[in-house]
Image (spheres, rainbow, N blue to C red):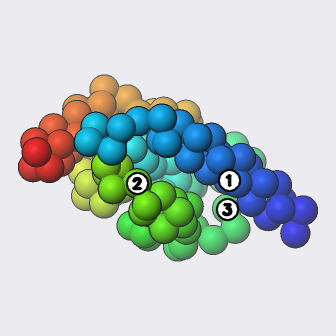
Amino acid sequence: RQRQMCIRDSYEAWLSHMNSFLETIPSDVPVYLVWIPHCSQVNDYYVNNLNSLGATFEDKALIQQADYPFFAQAKKDLKAFTNVTQLNPLETFQANDSVDNRLYFANDPHINNNGNVVLSDFLQSKILAHK
């Protein structure tokens, strides 16, 4: 319960900063928020690697959904900013990560070169399609 309150407090602080920041941007200037997925959201390969290092996950299935709670809440909370487009590459990462093409380092939650290529292609296609 205390962990959930800490997460909620962190989210509320983030949201306050985002609102303050976005209010300074003219409404005719496009803003793109890119949600880089944590490796544990992509598939069980990374979950298992992190578990072997001592990590625990409360609800793996929930965070691996395309509309996971943090993203879903951010979409609701920032919808008043019509110039803001939120880009979520989770499904693209899930579709492109495989045994032969890992997008993250094995025991590190950062994307590797393959992940950067997939992210770059995703962003280019979404931003160009949005214009």
Based on the displayed image, in which of its 4 quarters is residue 27 positioned? top left
Q: Which residue lies furthest to the top in this view?
A: 113
The residue sitting at 79% across, 64% down in the picture is 4
**Residue 86 percent location from the top left of the image:** 36, 52
**Residue 75, placed above or below residue 13:** below
Residue type at mark 3 is Phe
**115 lies left or right of 5:** left
Residue type at mark 2 is Phe
- Could one spot residue 8 in this view of the protein? yes
Q: Is mark 3 on a helix, strand or loop?
A: loop
Category of crowding for the residue at label 3, using alpha-carbon neighbours closer than 10 angstroms: few (below 14), some (14–19), many (at least 20)? few
Residue under circle 1? 11
Residue under circle 2? 81
Q: Quadrant for the N terminus, please.
A: bottom right
Q: What element carries label 2?
A: loop
18 vs 115, nearest the viewer: 18
> How far separated are the C-alphas under marks 1 and 3?
19 Å
The residue sitting at 15% across, 38% down in the picture is 124
Residue under circle 3? 57
Please tell me whether mark 2 or mark 1 is closer to you in this view: 2
**Residue 50 percent location from the top left of the image:** 62, 47
- Could one spot residue 7 in this view of the protein? no
**Residue 11 percent location from the top left of the image:** 68, 53
> How far separated are the C-alphas under marks 2 and 3?
32 Å
